[in-house]
Each structure stands twice: as structure tokens, then as C-alpha cells.
Amino acid sequence: MNIQYFEHAETMSHRAAQFVLEAVRRKPDALLCTATGSSPKKLYQILKEEGQQDSAIFQKTRIIPLDEWIGLPTPKGSCNAYIEEHVLRPLQISEERYFGFNVASEHLERECNRIHELLNKEGPIDICILGLGKNGHLGFNEPANRLQPHCHIANLAPQSQEHRMIDSNAIKPTKGLTLGMQDILAAKKIILVVCGEDKELATTQLLLGNITNDCPATWLWKHHNVECLIVN
């Protein structure tokens, strides 16, 4: 794991964007896995600005989300709405190049299987953009005795149920769909952006280098190509 420290989220985001742009220029149809939340938002803004200067750069780029809430009463606060606003429209990613989750499906286990088959066909992921959860989760891979390898229905930890994305919802989701740890670790390159409040404990656990299911992010030490970008 290559660990870099930054004084400001702005400089961290520019470094993260540099990695993404290098991958897309090397492979125009690169498959990007996009996390949501505040940590990668500036990164996506920088990619938008780059796309405005070079309209061809993202013409073939493909996107798959990292996770999605189950049971939101409206699209507001959904990961899909976030990705639509911050990634798809700004980068002009067409519908056929976005592989979103269908959480409205009556058969969510089948939806998990569909995503698993899709990754087998379209993958592996070229760049996986991740944020670090307050409890060390990656996506909705929450601390557990056993971590799931592939797309699955996750029971959300209390910290996840209080996420800022859904703080306006009276009823909080208790479940989500997420790519599994094996899906994440199969990515060719992983960018972990660490910033925001209340991440100190999870960051400390991660940097100890001891792999434990109590902090799923520690499994990133098993990957050969991880850029861990931390704002002090």
C-alpha cells in the first residue's frame, strides 16, 4: 500500500484525479467503480473540469457503483442520484456505459447474481475509488465475522444508517446492496481517499497493517496496487 499524506482535501483530490486520468488515457474504456459521499466529491469535480477541456477523454469510460441503499422512500439521497449528479452527467457517461444496481427488483438475490455476472463479463474493475467508513467499512462491507466476496445484501451498521447522505430521511435504511470484498480486491488499482470527521480510529486501525474483519479496510493490505491518500 502506497500511503501519501496531504494537508488539504483539494491537493489530495488532485492527486487522486491524476491516477484516474492516467488509467483512462491508457485504457479509454476503463471500468471505474465509484464510491459516493463527501470524500470523493472534489475528485469528481476535477474529473468534470478535465472533461470540459478534453471532451473525448471519457467517451468510452464505463462506470459501476460501489453500493446502494435499499428501501429509500424517494431517489433523494440514493447512491444512484449522487452518481448521476457528480459522475454521469458531468462526464457525459451514456446509459449503456453505466451498470447501476436495481434495488427496486423484487428479487434482490437475483440482482446480486446479475451484478456478479456483469463483472465477470465487463470486469475486472480498472480503478476502484473508495472512501473509508467511520467503522472501517468499504462500501457496505461492514465489520463482521465473515466478509462476503461478491455483490450481496448487507445489514447496515448503526454508523452507516446515520450517514449524511440520508440524514433527511425519517426512516433510515437498514440494508444495502454492495460489491463484495473479492470484487474490490480484484480491481487492477484501488484509490482509497481518507478525509472527513471521525475517521481517526478507522485510519489508525488501517495503518497498523493487521488484517481483521473488524476493520474491512485492512484487507486492502492484500492488494498489490493501492494508493491510500490521507488528509491530516
Image: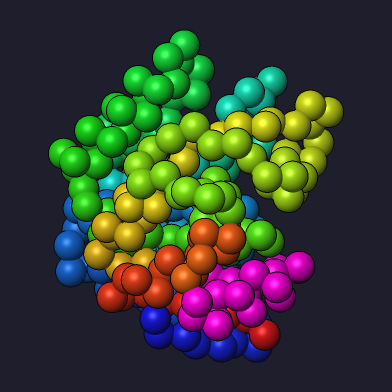
Q: Is residue 11 visible?
A: no
Q: Quadrant of residue 2?
A: bottom left
Q: Quadrant of residue 57?
A: bottom left
Q: Residue at x 49, y 80 (%)?
A: 209
Verify whether residue 204 appears in magenta. Answer: yes
- Residue 5 lies in the magenta-colored region: no
**Residue at x 22%, y 52% (from the top left corner):** 124
Residue 201 rendering spot, x and y as whole percentages: 70, 73
Q: Nearer the viewer, residue 77 or 150?
A: 150
* Magenta stretch bounds: 191-210
Q: Is residue 219 visible?
A: yes
The x, y position of residue 217, in whole percent, is: 51, 65
194 above or below 148?
below
Describe residue 219's horizontal placement relative to residue 6 as left or right. Answer: left
The residue sitting at 35% across, 42% down in the picture is: 150
User: Foreground residue, 140 or 143?
Assistant: 143
Residue at image position (55%, 83%) is: 208
In the rendered image, the quadrant that contains the C terminus is: bottom right
Q: How is the image coloured?
A: rainbow
Q: Residue 4's spot in the image, x, y percent?
A: 50, 87
Q: Name the residue nearer the viewer: 189 or 112.
A: 112
**Rendered-image quadrant of the N terminus:** bottom left
Q: Is residue 76 above or below residue 88?
A: above
Up/down of 227 relative to 36, above or below = below
Q: In the figure, is residue 197 to the left or right of 229?
A: right
